[in-house]
Every structure is written in structure tokens, then in C-alpha cells.
Image (cartoon, rainbow, N blue to C red):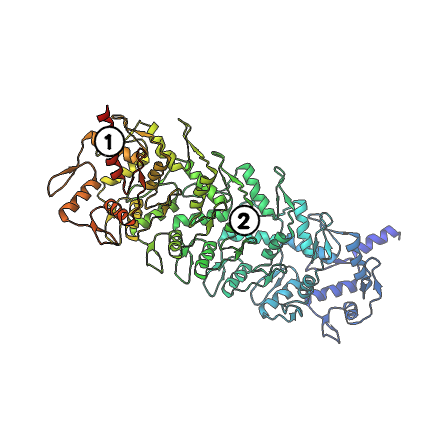
Amino acid sequence: MSETEHLIERKEELFTCDLCNKTFSKKKNFRAHLKIHTNVRNHFCDVCDKAFTNKKNLKAHLLIHSDVKSHVCDVCNKRFARKSVLIEHLRNHTGEKPFFCNICSKGFGQPSNLRTHLLTHSKEKPHICEKCGKGFSQKSALKYHLLTHKKEKQFTCETCNKSFLDNLDLKQHLLVHRGEKPFICEICGKGFTTKGILKTHSLTHMGEKPHICDTCNKAFAQKFQLMSHLLTHTGEKSHVCDICSRAFARKSELKVHLLTHTGEKPHVCDICNKAFVQRGSLMRHLLIHTGEKNHVCDICSRAFTQKFELKLHMFTHTGEKPHVCDICSKTFLQKIDLTRHLLTHTREKPFSCEICNKGFSQRGKLKLHLYTHTEEKPFVCEICNKGFSEKRKLKSHSFTHTGNKPYVCEICNKAYADKYKLKLHLFTHTEKKSYVCDICSKEFARKYDLSRHLLIHTVEKPHVCEICSTAFVQKGNLRRHLLTHTGEKPHVCEICNRGFSQSSYLKNHLISHTKENPHVCDICNKGFVNKANLKEHMGIHLKEKPHVCGVCNKAYGLLQSLKAHLRTHSVVKPYVCEICDLGFSRLPQLRMHSFIHTGEKPNVCEICNRGFAEKRTLWDHMGTHSKEKLHVCEICSKAYSCLKSLKRHLLFHSKEHSHVCEICNRQFSQLCNLKRHLLTHTNEKPYVCEICCSAFSRKSHLNRHSSTHMKEQPFVCDLCHKRFSHKEGLRKHLKNHRKQEISYV
């Protein structure tokens, strides 16, 4: 018989397993194989009582207990008890993968890995857990899974006392403490603690995403990412918090959530001691200290510390906002922004303050709110040690030291140190005011401004002064009010050392040193210190008054002036003085009125230090120093320094006397004249001299009388240099000079 015929005959004598169709050339190997299916294990290890199907496997196992490791790797000097294990190990260095999958042609270094891989194609999971019925493709995976039911973690780390189910997990964990990362990426040189993590990382370079969602066709690099993603379609949240009953799709999310109840933050930064709930958050935080920014934009070369930041930045170039609100069609860059926005429609506020029960739509806003109770300001300026509750406010404050204002308005080129202030400024350019007050019909560009305005109508004043019990709508107003009690003036002029209670007062004062008039009239090129003065000046040029009152036909040059005038016709006077119950149609009127009770005169003339309750009165007074009289009467050409005086004068020409005394029917052109007249009927003299107790009906009469005690004579005649204590005496004296001049003629 030839050799070829002998081989054919031998092939016909192959032994085939009826259970798994595996073939064997030798009968003894076939019999040994059958023991795998019957699970008959007659060969026991004397050391650990482990059972094996044949003597050969037992012999190989005994080498594990033996300290003899005679087979050494020439590359890494690692020692092995068996030669076959060394051969398999060498393939890690050479990269040789001789065992290929017949279905997908994927290569493997060991036949056992190939067998495991084949189960992924068949989706066969023969190893079933008896407790929960979960199936596994490998016996080792089932063995590891059974440890989760025991909930015993026998392997403990001696460094941090963390426990693990398996010894292999502990070995991998120890690499974290040693800082050892033996598995290096050949493309970017990044190190990893396990081979599995390196394998996952390598997919980011290849861009390979083999795991695809059947519902939305989204691809993922790892299977566990796909499994997590599938929960978003099913909406299944099987992991429930025992404390607050909040449900989560993944166990890891529940684990992280539980730390919010305990307040535990196990991951601490070695540089600044800041603690974090998750290790990933700590790793991202460390990039702040290193300043490492590996993710660079291809368009503008801007660098970012994290990949997701770069991804979001790219939308600024494309203008794409993929997340759309189904209710109002507003678009957002991030899904989290859309989620927050949806709460504005539902008005849901799931985060409540435990101290005052105030609700918030976001956890971050609640966190900031808590600082108002604790008065904690964790963000401190390194230059002036001023504390802030928000990092954003500290960043904006730092620009006050550098003078840098990086946020510039594209319309008017006005610069701001804070991005939020620029956002507020942009509302001044838009004419759209979609938020309207239901009570007084006042319009606002922002919802926040409307909500603040509504507090005026509700008369709700939650911020109360502890000294005088005066209540305020806003906390900022209370803060400014407290300065009136302390007398503190923290804003000091560097030129003349004059102090001011508010930064805006200092800003206006500085212009007096520079003599700068930044607000210029487009018609006559006259400059003004502030915008309000320019606005008043424009009334001279703009004789056109297109805005007419529908009630009394009074015309105004500005729409804002007409709106203010309409409130005088309204019966509703929502702003009521708490002391005398007098009602006002506008809040500024109430504020000015309150100065009558307090005697406060916050508006001070910089030339003569005279104080005024109203800013407008101060502006009128400033005209007396300049001696410039821009407001001219068209009838008699008489000039006045302020518009108010001109208006009073015009009433004499019109001969309009709308204010009538109810007692004697005498008519007056102005309300103030009627009020003074009424004192003649009541004989009321509220103004009393502190020296001689003489009483007067008018304050001007008291002032004139007071000068007689002081013997002060500030008014001097330019002709004969005679001095007078009051202006009226000088005026009468000048008439005598005029009579003398006429008699000489």
C-alpha cells in the first residue's frame, strides 16, 4: 500500500464527536474529549483539590504550585513553569497571531482566545448563572460574575483599603498607586494600566466604531458604550436611590449619585486639595494646573484642554445648534442647555434650598444661592483679597486691576470686562421689548427685568435694613442704603482724595478733573458730562414734538417723556410712601419724596458743596455757576440757565391759571404757588428759626431771616459796593441807582 493510500485510509478512521462535531485522529484523544461533555473529572490536585479530566492537564496544573520556573523570556526576563505558556507569551512581543477566525478573519495569539471569539458570532452563552439566569460565553466570566452575588470583596489594597472581588482587579488597581502604565500606545505614546484600556484607546486613532445601534444607527467604539446608549431608547432606569427615589439607567450613575447624599469626595487634587466625586473630574481639573491644551482648532488654532470643549467650539464656526426645543423651536449647542431650557416651559424647580425652601431649576444655581446663607466667598482675588461667590465674578473683577475689557460691542464699540454685562448692553440696541407688565404696561427686553419690576407693584420688599427697618425691593439697594448709616465712602478719587459711596458717583466726579465732556450734541457740537444732560439739551433743538397725549393733547419730543406724562393721568398710584401714605405714579417720584422725611441730600454740587434731593435740581443749580443761559423765551427774549425756569416763566405769558384756591378762588399758574398761598389761610408756619424761634411760612423767608443773625452779607452792589444780607435787598437797591440815572438824564 502506497503512502497516499495509507493517508486516505487514516482519514477515514477519524473519530468524530456527536455533540460538537470535533474530529480526532487518535482514539485516546477522542475518549479524553468526551469527558469534557460528561464533566467526569477523576484526576485531583493534592494541594488545592482542583479536578481535571485527564492526567496531562493535572500535571500541567501542578507546575503552578511548584516554584520551579525554568522557561525564561529573552525579551522581558519573565519566567514561566511551562514551555507552552512561554511560547504564547512570546507572541505578545512579536505580535504574531497565527489563529484566524473563519468568519471575520480576525487573528489571535492563542487558540483559547479564538474559541472565545467564535462565541461572539454564534451569540452562544453556554455558561448560565444559577442565581440570576444571566448567560456568559466563557466560564471565567461566569466565575467572576458569581462573586458579585456573594458581595464579598476578599482582596484589599493595603494603601487605600479599597476592596476588590478578584485578585486580578487588585493587581490592576495597585498600578494606580505606583503610577505604573506598562501598556503604551505606539501612535501617541500615551500609557495605560491595562491592555484592555489600551485596546479601547487605539480605536480612537483608527476611528473604528464597530458597535452600531439598530434603532438610530449611531456607532460606538466599545460594546459597553452601545449597551449604555440603548438605555436611552428604552428609557429603562432600574437602579433606584434608596434616599430620594431617583432612578438611573446605570449602576455606576447611581453610585456617583449616592456620593451627593453622603457629601463624600474621595478624589483629591494633590496641588490645591480640591476634592471631586469622580476620578474623571479630578483628571480634567489637573489639566488646569498643567496648562496642557492638546486639542487644537484647525480653523482658528485655539487650544482646549478637553476634546468636548473643542467639539463645542467647532459649532461657533459652523453656527450649528443641533438641539431644538419642541415647544418654542429655540436651538442650543448642548443637550444639557436644552434640558435646562425645557424647565422654563414646565416651570419645574427640582432643586430646593433646605434653609429657605426656595426652588431652583439648576443645581448650580442652588449652590450659588447657598452662599447667600453662609456668606461664603470661596473665590478670592490674589491682588486685593476681595472675595466672590462665583468664579465668573472673580474673573470680571480681575480686569479692574489690569484695565482689560475684552468683550466689545460690535455696534457701538463699547468694551466690558464681563461677558454678561456685554449681553445686557446689547439689549439697549434692540428695540424688541417682548416682556410687558400687566399692571402699568411698561415694556422690558428681558424677563429678569420684568420680574424685578413686578416687585414694585406687589410692594414686596424682602430686604430690610437692621438699623432703621427701611425695606427695599433689591439687595443692591439695601447695600447702598447701609452706606448712609456707616458714612463709608469706599470709592476715593486719586486726584483730590474725595470719597464717594458709589463707583458711579466717582466716575462722574473724575470727569470734573479731566474737564472732559464725552457726550456731544450732533447739532451744535456742545459737550456734556453725562448722557442725561445731553438728553435735556436736545430738547432745545428738537422743537418738533411728535408724541401727543391722547388725554390733554400735550406734546413731547421723546416717547419716554410721553409715557411718564401718561402716568399723571392714571388714577393708579402704586408707589405709596410708608410714612405719610402719599401715592405716586412713578418710583423715582417716591424716592425723591422720601428725602423730605429723611432730610437726605445725596446730590452735592462740586463747586459750592450745596446739597440737593433731586439730581435734576442739581443740574439746574449748576447753571447758576456757569452763568450760561441757553434757554431763551421766544416772546420776550429773556434767558434762563435751566429749562425748568423757562417753563415757569412761559406760564406768565400764557396767563393760564389752572390751580385754584378752594377757599378764596384765587388762581395760580403753578401748584407750588397754590401750596404756599394755602399757608396764609391756615396760618401755618412750619419753618422755625433755631436762634430766636421766629416762624415763617416759606423756607426762603427763614433763610433770609437767618442771615440777620449771622450778619453775613454775601450780596454786593457793583456800583457803590454796598453789601446786603439777601438778594431781594440788593435788587431793590439797584432800582435806586437806575432812578438816579434817569433823573440825571
Q: Nearer the viewer, residue 311 or 443?
A: 443
* Residue 253 point in image, percent of width and height: 53, 58
* Secondary structure at numbered mark 2: helix
Name the amino acid type tagged 1.
Answer: Leu
Residue lying furthest bottom: 46
Q: Is residue 215 visible?
A: no
* Residue 446 point in image, percent of width and height: 39, 43
Task: Judge whether 441 appears above or below 101 on screen.
Answer: above
* Residue 567 point in image, percent of width and height: 26, 40
Tell me the mark number nearer the camera, choosing from 2 and 1. Answer: 1
Name the amino acid type tagged 2.
Answer: Ser
Q: Residues within 10 Å of mark 1 (few under 14, many from 20)?
A: some
Residue lying furthest right: 2
Q: Nearer the viewer, residue 695 or 60?
A: 695
Task: Judge whether 127 appears above or below 499 on screen.
Answer: below
Q: Residues within 10 Å of mark 2 (few under 14, many from 20)?
A: some
Task: Judge whether 310 appears above or below 195 on screen.
Answer: above
Give me the disc on residue 398: 2
Residue 124 image-quadrant placement? bottom right
Picture residue at 47% right of the left edge, 45% below the top: 420
Q: Which residue is mark 1?
A: 650
Q: Nearer the viewer, residue 88 or 686?
A: 686
Q: Is residue 565 visible?
A: yes
* Residue 108 point in image, percent of width and height: 73, 53
Give me the disc on residue 587: none
Residue lying furthest front: 744
Residue 188 appears left or right of 660:
right
Label 2 and label 1: CA atoms lie apart by 53 Å
* Secondary structure at numbered mark 1: helix
Picture residue at 54% right of the left edge, 60% below the top: 256
